[in-house]
Image (cartoon, helix red, strand yellow):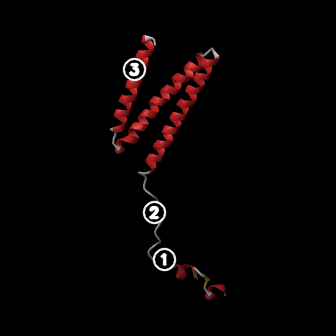
Amino acid sequence: MSEALLTALTVFVLAILVGFAVISKVPATLHTPLMSGANSIHGIVLVGSMFIAAAATEPLSQLLSFVAVAFATMNVVGGYVVTDRMLQMFRRKPTAPKAPAGAGTAAAAGGGTAAGPSPEAKG
């Protein structure tokens, strides 16, 4: 194993550990704003992967760059979907409009009941 590969592998493992430690300590109330910020970072990753895909010349590098673009796109779209679903939890539910105060009951106003119209309404 070369020294460069060992260094890259060490950085990768440390990044995983630090990322897990940071994300696991985020309270739920801050998750939505952080997701929105992370989506903008993932957009930069998507642009970078598209630049790499445009410069790819060998079939293996073209395939890997295509996979990178696909994963980055899924990450951006999925992040916005999750953020939207989380924000929907904080929206107020629409309330039914209230009847005017002088309208009275439904039978008096419309001449009918749940069973059907009253006999007086037919004539």
Mark toward the viewer: 2 or 3:
3
Few, some or many residues within 10 Å of mark 2 (<14, 14–19, 20+): few
The residue tagged 2 is 95
Residue in the picture at 42% in, 37% down: 35
From this view, report whether residue 22 is shown above or below residue 65: below
Where residue 64 sits: x, y (%)? 58, 22
The residue tagged 3 is 10
Residue in the picture at 48% in, 44% down: 84
CB within 8 Å, label 1 to label 3: no
Q: What is the distance, in whole Å, between disc 1 and disc 2 at their CAs?
A: 19 Å
Residue 93 lies in what quarter of the image?
bottom left
Between discs 1 and 2, the one toward the N terminus: 2
Q: Nearer the viewer, residue 101 or 79?
A: 79
Between discs 1 and 3, the one toward the N terminus: 3
From this view, report whether residue 78 is shown above or below residue 105: above
The residue tagged 1 is 103
Q: Nearer the viewer, residue 111 or 2?
A: 2
Q: What is the distance, in whole Å, between disc 1 and disc 3 at their CAs?
A: 75 Å
Circle number at residue 57 = none
> Judging from the image, what secondary structure is the residue with disc 1 in?
loop
> Judging from the image, what secondary structure is the residue with disc 2 in?
loop
Few, some or many residues within 10 Å of mark 1 (<14, 14–19, 20+): few
Q: What is the distance, in whole Å, between disc 2 and disc 3 at their CAs?
A: 56 Å
Residue 122 lies in what quarter of the image?
bottom right
Is residue 122 left or right of 10 when viewed as pictured?
Answer: right
